[in-house]
Amino acid sequence: MLPCSFVMFLQRMFDFLDNSFFLNKIACVSVCCLITVEFVSTATRSLPTNMPINTPAKKRVDLTIADKVKVIKLLDSVPKLSQTEVGKRFGCSTAQVCRINKNREEIMRQWECNSNPNRKRKREGKSGEVEEALMRWFVNARAKNVPLSGPILMEKARQLAESLGDENFKPTDGWLGRWKQRNGIAFKRGHGEKKDADTQSAENWVRDVLPGILQEYDEDDIYNCDETGLLYRALPSGTLAQKTETVSGSKKAMDRISVMFCCNMTGTDKLTPLVIGHSRNPRCFRGQRVPLPWESNKKAWMTAAIFREWVRKIDVEMGRRRKKIVLLLDNCTAHPHDIPLENIRLVFLPANTTSLIQPLDQGIIRNFKGLYRAQMLRRVISAVDNDEIDNAQKFAKTTTVLDALFMVREAWKGVKDVTVRNCFGKVSIDELHFVNCM
């Protein structure tokens, strides 16, 4: 766009030419064009050479705490690597790499304190002093396995604020949510028995005993057995619902049976489950074909007598197959040690270690129970589609032990070989961070 002064100059030039002897319009246009070209060339040469070009601003890249730790480890592992090269690898500036290297102690302290690994910048809340004190108290309480909730944290924050003399601090639900997000804290429900497990004994067993078993027996000849309780009439407690709907809970069906599972390391041999119930001869069994072996006692638990009879039958079956196997099992009172067997070697796991090193507890039984619940839900959905029920919980209570046995059989068939192999692999890889001896 031409300056206003130059435009006025051209306008006066045209007026002058119209009133002068230059009557040829073509000549007038030519003269104006030459003047314009000369003016633009002069203006362009007068511009500074370092004038910035309108290009899109470079987007700032902030690394998370996890990425910053990776930068520090890379700088330590490759001392000759320049900070510029590190910045290129992580897509950030050299200055940011320099700041990370300068503040490495603080970054590593936050990382070791389980600070939020996805946090990029440290944002302070209402009171940084109170929040830091609360975080220290939280870490100490969790180290002692104290279950904590939102109201407990808010009450403790209020007490800490009073002790620190911060009268203006008032914890709210919004503040608590932001504090948990900044520190990477989430609600989790405890499962299993790992808190009571003897980790040292489990590590010793994996290091000292497991390698010998793996060398002496083939993968197809290494078995594991375990029992689990099954609430065979229970339905899932949660459900999807419309936001306007009020979901009311109901009393959970507590009818229980026990199921004994046994399978080999490769998942190619899943033995028929043994089911233990309360009644010796349930009414639903009369005149019916029972799909699985059935035992009973008053508490529907495994007993030493039931286990002896079961393992002897397995020993006879392995003899017919001409197989010599090793059977891993937990060291409970229902599993006697003094059972004479010809084809089975019993290897008992150390006490309080089954949640860590027993393969069936690493996900096989959990997978089975998920498949069993799916079978139950299919029965309920089928009844709903056929208008046979008014209430799902009431319908579930009509499930007989015989129905449960058929569903147990189908659910156990549904457990895949790869699931079994992965769970056996967890014993020496995932849970205890040992190198797989296989």
Image (cartoon, rainbow, N blue to C red):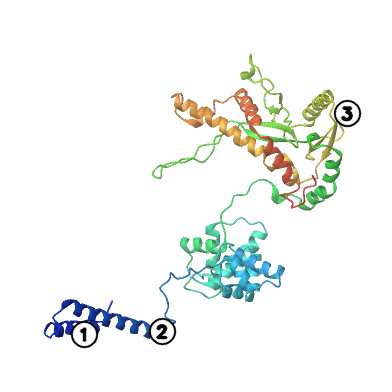
Q: Residue at x 53, y 32 (%)?
A: 377
Q: What residue is at 15 percent from the left and 85 percent from the top?
A: 16
The answer to whether residue 301 shows anywhere in this view is: no
Q: Secondary structure at mark 1?
A: helix
Q: Dividing the picture into quarters, in which one does residue 367 lie?
A: top right
Residue type indicated by callout 2: Pro
Specify the farthest residue to the left: 19
Q: Which residue is mark 2?
A: 48
Instruction: From the image, tell me which residue sits under label 1.
Output: 9
Reading the image, the residue beneath label 3 is: 342
Q: Residues within 10 Å of mark 2 (few under 14, many from 20)?
A: few
* SS under mark 2: loop
From the image, which quarter does the N terminus lie in?
A: bottom left
Q: Which mark is residue 90?
A: none
Residue type of the residue flagged with mark 1: Phe
Residue 187 picture location, percent across and down: 56, 54
The residue that appears at 74% across and 33% down in the rendered structure is: 263
Determine whether the residue tagged by mark 3 lies in a helix, strand or loop: loop
Q: Earlier in the sequence, mark 3 or mark 2?
A: 2
The amino acid type, in three-letter code, at marker 3 is Glu
Residue 356 to residue 167: above or below: above
Cα–Cα gap, marks 1 and 2: 25 Å
Q: Nearer the viewer, residue 72 or 201?
A: 72
Label 1 vs label 2, nearer the camera:
1
Q: Report the mark closest to the observer, 3 or 2.
A: 2
Few, some or many C-alpha atoms within 10 Å of disc 1 (few <14, some 14-19, many ≥20)?
A: few
